[in-house]
Image (tube, grey):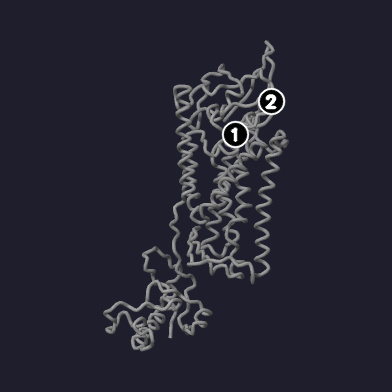
Amino acid sequence: MVSFKSPFARKADDQDYVADDASQYSTSKDQSYELSQMQSESSYTGAHSSVYRDPYGDNVPLTEVTPQPTGSYNPWVPGAQQLDPNSAAAAGITISPELPPPRMALVKKSKAWPWFLIFISFIQIVVFIAELIVMGKYTGKPIETKPEFNPMIGPSPYVQIHMGSRFAPCMHSISGITDDTSIKWPCPNATTSADKCSLSELCGMGGIDTDHPNQWWRFITPIFIHAGFLHIIMNMVLQVMLGFRTERELGHLKTAIIYLAAGINGFVLGGNFTPNGISSCGASGALFGFLAVQLVDLVLNWRAFEHPKSYLFRLLIDIVISFVMGLLPGIDNFAHIGGFMVGITLGIALLRSPLKIREMSGEDDGYYYAPTAGRWYVRKYDSIRIVFKNKPAVWYLWVFIRLFMIVLTAIYMIVLIRNFKEGGGHCSWCKYLSCVPISNWCESGYISAASSSSSSKLMQYRLFE
């Protein structure tokens, strides 16, 4: 007779395991039951008696233990494969129902390195060092102090534009602005308000066609550019604390898709609704996508979390504080909003199925997640097959929802990009999603051409207010 494997057994490969809530089964009754089983098995004289003998008795063989047949179950050999009742019955093995199985099985803690975000972080640090070097080459100082001090403690916004931050005049035509070659713009090496250059010199990166500026890559490159030491430190801290955990949970490919899609969409949304004179950069949109993913997983798998209410409270506090900070001058809250929206849609599309659906369709036989304090731990079996038959109707419905969310995300981004190329969004109240109407905060960043007494046109702008 074969009994269930003890919930405290460890595999032979010395990997770390977590036995969540399994201690409730270590009652004195269970211990006495296991001792009686050990005594009865020590006198077993079946075909595999050398395997089933009591490991603590006097009859332990001095020779190497005979390997058990493939697919059988031995409660006394660490690392033995545990059979489910159906497989055991097919093999003619009886499993004792007297010892209850643990409510939560032993699970292996994921130790996968978050290589994608490590690589992205490395690139961002290298690019920021390059910004400082270029700023020092142009002005003699790596930190902007003239004509204004950069509160983020970094290079000027003109150097950031020159190196690839999102700046609308470099990306699409603005009637009366980009097509007027008499307008002068600040130079990348500007230290006074009198230093003026052409728009092509400011944009750099090969220059632009003043009739049709089209540096579309500025929706992507700003993810790797930061405004200063404070900016990159804050992003790196959140990227390590939140992003690394997310990549361990989702894997490299899904993390890369969410990170890049959320970051790009943040800049696309900002390009439509922020003033044309605002230069924007940073990875905040991508990180807000990760916040949305964590929120989606908590809502869809509420019962799977150990303390879901406290985790939800912490998440909501983080989200609210981050959005409120986005209302301050110098912060593009549209990038936060855009990244968060894509994080929700792609989170539904790429995350594990809701717990209820997985229970109904038996998906836990492939992957078993045991979230603890907001983390996921994963156990993988030797082989996993995705089967599209013998599933409940709700499982197919969830597959349709996943596909719909992917299509919705693609349509959403295509519409915004086309709208941007046609001049951007036209919304009189949308600017209040990224500013507070105090001290003309919401009026900064608008550019226009004004005639001076000599009929030459001067640009009125405010960047990174």
- Vertical position of residue 319 compared to residue 360: above or below: above
In the rendered image, which quarter is residue 42 located in?
Answer: bottom left
Tell me, yes or no, whether the two marked residues, 1 and 2, touch with CB atoms within 8 Å.
Answer: no
Residue in the foreground of this view, choosing between 13 and 452: 13
> In screen coordinates, is 255 left or right of 43?
right
Where is residue 334 shown, x and y percent of the image? 62, 40
Mark 1 vs mark 2: give the one in front: 2
Q: Name the secondary structure under disc 2.
A: loop
- Separation (CA) of disc 1 from disc 2: 19 Å
Residue 412: in sight, yes or no?
yes
Say which of 124 and 239 sits in front: 124
Determine which of the numbered discs, if any, sits on residue 224 in the image: none
Considering only vertical position in the picture, is 452 above or below 427? above
Q: Residue at label 2?
A: 211
Instruction: Describe the element under mark 1 as helix, strand or loop.
Output: loop
Q: Does the rendering let one see residue 356?
A: no
Q: Residue at x 64, y 52 (%)?
A: 345
Label 2: how many residues lie within 10 Å, few (<14), some (14-19) or many (20+)? some
Quarter of the figure with the N terminus = bottom left
Measured as percent of width and height from the top left, residue 6 is found at 41, 75
Q: Nearer the viewer, residue 101 or 325?
A: 101
Q: Give neighbour class at mark 1: few <14, some 14-19, many 20+ (Cα, 10 Å).
A: many
The amino acid sitting under disc 1 is Arg
Position in image of residue 326 (x %, y %): 58, 40
Q: Which mark is residue 166?
A: 1
Q: Residue at x 54, y 60 (%)?
A: 308
Q: Is residue 261 above or below residue 218?
A: below
